[in-house]
Structures are given as C-alpha cells and as structure tokens.
Amino acid sequence: MKLSSPVRPRKSRIVIIPLIDIMFFLLASFMMLALEMSKTENIKVNLPSASQSAQDYRPDMVNIAVDKSGAVWLEKKRISLADLASVLKDRFHDNPDVPVYISGDRDTLHGDMVKVYETVRAAGIQKVAFMTGNSPAEATR
C-alpha cells in the first residue's frame, strides 16, 4: 500500500536572472578596465590647457609630438619632416580616414607646430587635431 505524504513535493528550478546580472557587471567592469589600459604611445610633453578638450585614443591613429626644441617625434621615435611625410603618405594610402593627433609642448614655437601641420596636410590627411590638457593641473602631469 502506498501512502502519500502530506507535504507536496517541490519542483526544483534554476533561477538565472542573478547570473545575468553578475555577467553584465563583469562585462561592464572589463570594459572600463580595458578603456583605462589604452593610452597613447608618445613622448611626454607639457600640453597647454583648453576649456573644452576630449581625449580620444584609438589604435589606428597617428600621434605626432613636437618638443620644446622643435624636434618631431612619431610614436616615441624622433623623425625628420621628410620622413614624417613619407610615413603619413603610406598610412594615408592604407587608410584615407586615418586620424592624426599633434601634441606640442607648452613652450614649443608656433612655427614648428605649423611646419608639422603643413606636412600632415600635404600628405592628404583631413582628420587633424591638436591635443590639449583639460586643466592646468592635468597639463603639468
């Protein structure tokens, strides 16, 4: 004879909603960490400050720096303007939408920055921007 229990048997179930929340948290944390890790490979220059500046770092962009003495640096390597022109023409040939960021020290002469800008424009590149710092405190870092 079979006797039934007065307590109803519970069906087990798996609740996945908390697991989804945890996965979204881990994804957001990973993305924020990855954004913090991507920095430009350029020499240290004392950037002038600007009231509105936004930093945009992408792996396909070209970073050019001009130091106090007027020397031109392309991704931590000193380069002449003639060599810079040939490198930029090659990159423009590979990708016509390549962005170029020019950063100059606060004490760099205006004429040196203009020479670099003219070299970039002569290579055919249209997307040119100058890097600035957000505030005087950030520009001295």
Image: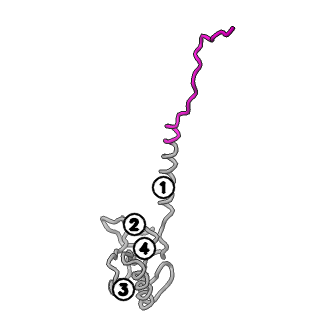
Q: Is residue 7 above or below residue 19?
A: above
Disc 2, disc 4: CB below 8 Å? yes
Q: Type of residue at label 3?
A: Ala
The residue closer to the viewer here, 92 or 136, is 92
Q: Type of residue at label 2?
A: Asp
Residue 105 visible in the displayed image: no
Label 3 residue SS: loop
Judging by the rendered image, the residue that carries numbered circle 3 is: 123
Residue 41, image x and y in percent?
Answer: 49, 73
Question: In which quadrant is the N terminus drawn?
Answer: top right
Give the farthest residue toward the right. Answer: 1
Say the numbered circle drawn on residue 31.
1
> Which quadrant of the structure image shows residue 112?
bottom left
Range of magenta residues: 1-21
Residue shown at 43% from the left, 84% from the top: 90
Residue 120 visible in the displayed image: yes
Disc 3, disc 1: CB below 8 Å? no
Say the numbered circle drawn on residue 56.
2
Along the polypeptide, which appears first: circle 2 or circle 1?
A: 1
